[in-house]
Image (tube, rainbow, N blue to C red):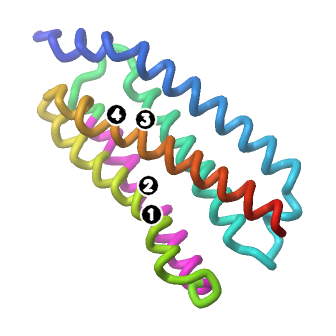
């Protein structure tokens, strides 16, 4: 059995441990913040708060899960690809659900702003699919050019949404 791919994935594990730790910390802090401000978040007067909270939380959870997949010992590219594709499918389901719910509030919030909110998550989802294709063929370039940017995009999106949540919650 050729172990080149597995050996190279093992070299990436400190990166994925760090990313999972950072995202886990951020999701914990977000959870505490949401718990403290629960009444404002679930209020029907501003559905954008709940939407931002859900998306921030899910972005951080996706980062943790993707990172954990790369920490599973002796995993071949086929398994990693299937896990990334499963994450992409779950992300698509969540995005469609969120888009449908937010389309009802589009006249107040503005369709353009809603579209802009979803650009980064859609790009991350596409990146997961492409990364899965490369990893399925055990081509490590998928990590460099797709997995790392996906994680960075999800991290930036989650932090941006959490910041918007903070700003919007303070105005409410």
Relative horizontal placement of residue 40, taking residue 121 as reference (left or right) = right
SS assignment at label 2: helix
**Earlier-in-chain disc, 4 versus 3:** 3
Q: Do the residues labelled 3 and 2 touch (CB within 8 Å)?
A: no
Q: Which residue lies furthest to the bottom in this view?
A: 107
Q: Name the quadrant containing residue 67.
A: top left
Q: Callout 1: few (<14), some (14-19), or many (20+) C-alpha neighbours within 10 Å?
A: few
User: Majority secondary structure of the magenta segment?
Assistant: helix
**Earlier-in-chain disc, 3 versus 1:** 3
92 and 29: which is toward the camera:
29
38 and 160: which is toward the camera:
160
71 and 107: which is toward the camera:
107
Q: Where is residue 19 in the image (x, y as percent from the top left)?
A: 49, 26
- Residue labelled with disc 2: 90
Q: Are marks 2 and 1 in contact (CB under 8 Å)?
A: yes
Q: Which of marks 3 and 2 is in front?
A: 3
Residue drawn 58% across the image and 77% down it: 101
Q: Callout 2: few (<14), some (14-19), or many (20+) C-alpha neighbours within 10 Å?
A: few
SS assignment at label 4: helix
- Residue labelled with disc 1: 93
Q: Position of residue 162 (x, y in %)?
A: 65, 51
- Residue labelled with disc 3: 66
- Residue labelled with disc 4: 148
**Earlier-in-chain disc, 2 versus 4:** 2
**Earlier-in-chain disc, 3 versus 2:** 3
């Amino acid at each position: 059995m050729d172990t080149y791919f597995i050996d190279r994935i093992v070299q990436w594990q400190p990166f994925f441990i760090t990313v999972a730790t950072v995202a886990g910390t951020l999701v914990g802090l977000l959870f505490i913040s949401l718990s403290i401000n629960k009444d404002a978040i679930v209020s029907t007067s501003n559905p954008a708060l709940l939407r931002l909270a859900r998306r921030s939380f899910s972005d951080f959870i996706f980062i943790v899960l993707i990172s954990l997949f790369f920490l599973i010992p002796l995993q071949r590219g086929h398994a990693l690809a299937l896990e990334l594709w499963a994450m992409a499918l779950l992300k698509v389901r969540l995005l469609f659900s969120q888009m449908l719910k937010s389309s009802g509030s589009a006249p107040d919030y503005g369709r353009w702003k809603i579209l802009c909110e979803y650009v980064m998550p859609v790009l991350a989802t596409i990146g997961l699919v492409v990364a899965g294709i490369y990893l399925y063929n055990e081509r490590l370039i998928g990590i460099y050019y797709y997995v790392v940017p996906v994680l960075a995009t999800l991290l930036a999106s989650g932090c941006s949404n959490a910041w918007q949540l903070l700003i919007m919650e303070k105005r409410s």
